[in-house]
Structures are given as C-alpha cells and as structure tokens.
Amino acid sequence: MDLAQLTPYQKRAFVPQGADLADQATVLGLYEKLEKQQINSVQDLDEWLLRRSELDAALSQAGSILYIRMTCQTDDPAAAGAYTKFVQTIPPAVEPVNDRLNRKYLETCKTYPLDAKRYEVYDRAVKTSVELFVPENVPLQTKVALLSQEYQTVTGSMTVHFEGREQTLPQMGKYLLETDSSLRERAWKATAERRLKDKDKLEELFDAMFKLRNDIAHNAGFSIFTDYQFKAYQRFDYTPADCKKYHETVEKLIVPLNGKILKRRKEQMKLNALRPWDTSVDPLGEKPLAPFSQPQELIRGTSAIFNKLDGDFGLQFAEMEKLGLLDLASRKGKAPGGYQSTLSEARKPFIFMNAVGVDDDLRTLLHESGHAFHCLACACDPILDYRHGPMEFCEVASMAMELLGGEHLGEFYGPHDLQRSRREHLEGIIQVLAWVANIDAFQHWLYEHPRHSAAERSLAWNELYERFGARFIDWGGLSEVKNYLWHRQLHIFELPFYYIEYGIAQLGALQVWLNARRDPKKALGDYKRALALGGSRPVRELYRAAGISFDFSEEIIKPLVEAVAQEWERLA
C-alpha cells in the first residue's frame, strides 16, 4: 500500500486536503496562520493547540513517509532526492516559526492558563525548546541531518560476494550461526573487510558531524555537547553522572556474568581461545535455530504469539499486516537495522527490519511491535506531543514485549529449541547491558574531549571495550577491525547519546518480566495502562504505572542480574 493513501485518524479541520507538505511555501503559510490567530479565551487556546497538533502531525507523517521510502531503497535516486529536498527545505524553514509559536503559547498561558497537571509535561517541553532555540543552529542541524542520510546510504550499500552470490551484511550474519568453524571465520572476515573499505568515509562523516554538534552546543551557550544533548532530549530525571553510575554498576555486576557465559561457551566448544566468530554459534554444535524461511511465516507465527498474549495485540498486528505497514525482509539497497516509525496523522505504526530467518529476527519483530502497540495505545490523545513517550519508557514498551512475547515462542519451536532460544535471549540481554555501557561511556569520552585526534579516539575505544568485555575474546591479528567496531553503532552517528535508554529500559523490562512471572494478568494490565499514557506524564510516573521503578542503581540491578543468572543456569 502507498503509505500516503492511509486514512487519517480523523478528518482534518485546519490543514487543507491535498496540501503539498513537501512545499516550503505551503507549509510556512499554514504555520503563519497559527502565528497570526487571535486567542481570547481558554477555549481559543485549546482549539489553537489542536490545530497546531494537526499540522505538526501531518508534516511529521509527510517526512516519515519520505524517510521510510529512502531507507527501504537507499539506491533509489528519486527516493533519496525527495528526502534530501524535504530535509533541506522544510525543517529549516519551520524551526524559526515554531520557536515563535512556542513563545506565543507560553505568553498566552499567562493570561489564559490551562489545566496545570494535564499540560505539565507539555509546558516543560515547550519551555526547554524555547531555551535551546538559536537561529544560527538551524542550518547546522540541517547539515547534520544530511550527513546522517549519507551514513545510511554508505552502510545500506554494503554487500559481500560470498558463497557464489552477492549478500547484504544482515544476510551474512546467518553464517555466524553455522557449526563449520572455517565457514564462520570466512564469513566474519569477509564482512569485516567490507566494513573496513568504508572506514575512512565513515571517519570523515563522523568528524563532520562531531564538529557541527559541538558548534551547535556552543551557539546555544553550552560548554559541552553532552549537556546540550541531555537538555535537548529533555532528560529531567537523570544526569550524565547517573549514566556513569550505570557504567560502574554494569562493570561490577554485568561484565562478570557475561565473562562467565563466555567462559562456559569456550569450554563447551573445547577452544583454547574464543574468537569473534565463535560468539553466536550454538556452543554444543547444534544447527542454527531456523524459526522461519519466508517473511510470511514470521508474520503468521508472531501474529499467533500476540493473539495468545493479548487479544488487542493480535487484532492490532493483523491490521498492520493488512494495511501494508510491515517491511520485514532484507534485500540489496535496504538500509541496515530495524525501526518502528509512527505515521502521525494516520496514528499508525510502520515496522522496518531486515529479517533473514534467524532467531534474532523474532526478537526484533517483537521489539518493534512493542513500539507499535505503544503508538496505538496512546493514539487517541489529541495532543501530538503526548502520542509518544520519553525514550526511556518507549524502550520499556519494546524490550518488555521481547520478554512477554518470548514466553510463547513455541509457535516457532519445539521444546528443545524453545529452551535454546530463551537461553540465548538471556545471554543477549547480559551482553546488551554491557554493550550499552560501552557505547554510552565512549560517547561521554568523545564529547568530553572535543579536540581529540582519530588515534586518541581509537585508543579510548579500545580501553573502554576492554573494560566492558573485550578481554573475554581473542582479537589477535584483528586490531584494525577492533579499532573501528564502533562504526557499526548507528546511534553514535545519527542519534548521539541515544543509547543509554536501552540499558535503563532493559532494567525496566526485566522488572516487568519478573512481575509477569508472579502475576501475568496484573503485569500485562499495568504494562498496557502505562502504554496508554503515552508521553502525558513524567518518566518516573510512567514507570510506576507499569508497576516498576525508574532506578538503575546497584540496589535495583543486583536482584535482576541474579534472577537472569538463575534462569540462565536452569536453561543451560
């Protein structure tokens, strides 16, 4: 289905039907109408906010569709050109008028105050946007967005000629699950060598982004980009110091457990040293888990899982398939990774991923579906800003769904393979918690050292990688590959500091999982109620609504690690 033909959630009251939202003059004209609108009562202000939300949602959806088309086929010049034009012409033009609208709203509220609790989060966000807006930063932010698109193009074009055919890097990942050690090594090295071919280009891209971001922070009055970005992300509930506490706790509690997992793997595989291509294959030499061969099988089995878990989820997933809101298979020219994008006017989710028939694909679809259910749960809120939650809770929605849905993977596996899959998932959680600390600590180092050289950056990366687990793997003869492993993490390029959320949220998701083991019905009910709040309440309240704590101290992490370790031992 053409996403542009999706039916809006409700009929437009302000934006004309057929308005070209990729045309700068049209878009500016609509925003300027809002700027000139007279507001003489609380009712007028409410109506003005609804009009603004309608316009913001329509414009957001127009941009999302262009982004989806570009990532679905990065080698399509027309799709790339349309997205580039949008990025270059629309956001730069809209940002200044949006700042004026924010100031108009705050000033009007002094005369016609709205409900304090209802608009608490919205008001806080608007005030932050006003404080951060600097006209000189608009062209710099546009340049960053275009560099991000270039990163997508470079990584999306990476393919390897292997085993007689051209294959994408996600497709190459399947070979790391093969029991033939020689095949795994050849596949791993072929992929690594392909990435290294573009290392200089990616280094140049990052350096350009890095300079722009530091300039943006300085223009906004910040001495360090870290502080600017934390405020831009509206992280009101924790600080960079709290993130470093997370790093320390992970180093103390998570890294040793990961070391234990990898040590057992080495012993089971009867290896003198564990090499990078030995970390995904079944350690007992069993064939790779192969839950499906075609995307339709993935959809059918996942649909059954959602119907077992909750009837609403089953119906919602079926509607997504019917409306063509799933693009799951890996193919040449498709950007790497996976994401869920909200089509804000239709108030529908779109899921993008690169499925190749491996166990991780199940987790990815469950994860992105968690985001999708979050989108649908709060779709009725008339305020666009409240139809998406803070990132620290959005990832609870997705990661908890991996765990809740993971209880029903019998739709894909028999008892033995189900046990393998669940064990591998728990091992993956421990590895991810450590990797998140690694990536986040690296980003803190980067922006705390704004004048670092490429050599210093590489040294810092290696020191942190050793701290968070590289020492358990033999990287002999692979130093160049190891130096640039961070290139694989798109967040460092496209979403700086957006990664600690995965660690924080994983701790929240594990709490949901433990609650579900004690009382499945209550845990699911709490989870759904929290999703329905969207972004209308502060993050700590969202966590409380879900029956969990927003806390990533040792006091919270230790019992969670113990529970995972106990379950892992049971499944091993």
Image (cartoon, helix red, strand yellow):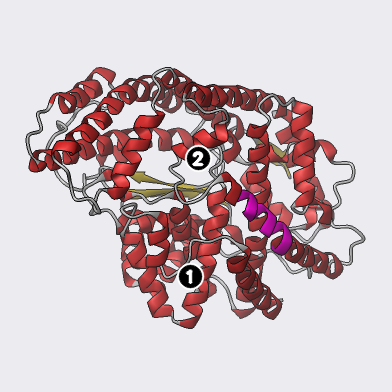
Nearer to us in this view, 463 or 492: 463
- Which residue is drawn at the image coordinates 60% and 29% (left, top)? 154
Residue 529: % across, % down: 33, 66
Q: Nearer the viewer, residue 445 or 224?
A: 224
* Nearer-N-terminus badge (1/2): 2
Which residue is drawn at the image coordinates 63% and 64% (left, top)? 554
Magenta stretch prevailing secondary structure: helix
Residues at circles 1 and 2 in contact by the CB criterion of under 8 Å? no
Residue 26 position within the rendered picture, expressed as x and y whole percent measured from the top left: 22, 21
The numbered disc on residue 230 is 2
Looking at this view, name the residue that lies furthest to the right. 272
For the residue carrying disc 1, how many other residues have a C-alpha within 10 Å: few (<14), some (14-19), or many (20+)?
A: many
Q: Quadrant of residue 555?
A: bottom right
Which range of residues does the magenta coloring cover? 243-253
119 on left or right of 528: left
Q: Label 1: state its secondary structure.
A: helix
Q: What's under tag 2, amino acid-wise?
A: Phe
| Residue located beneath label 1 in the image | 512
Quadrant where the N terminus lies?
Answer: top left
Is 252 situated above or below 242?
Answer: below
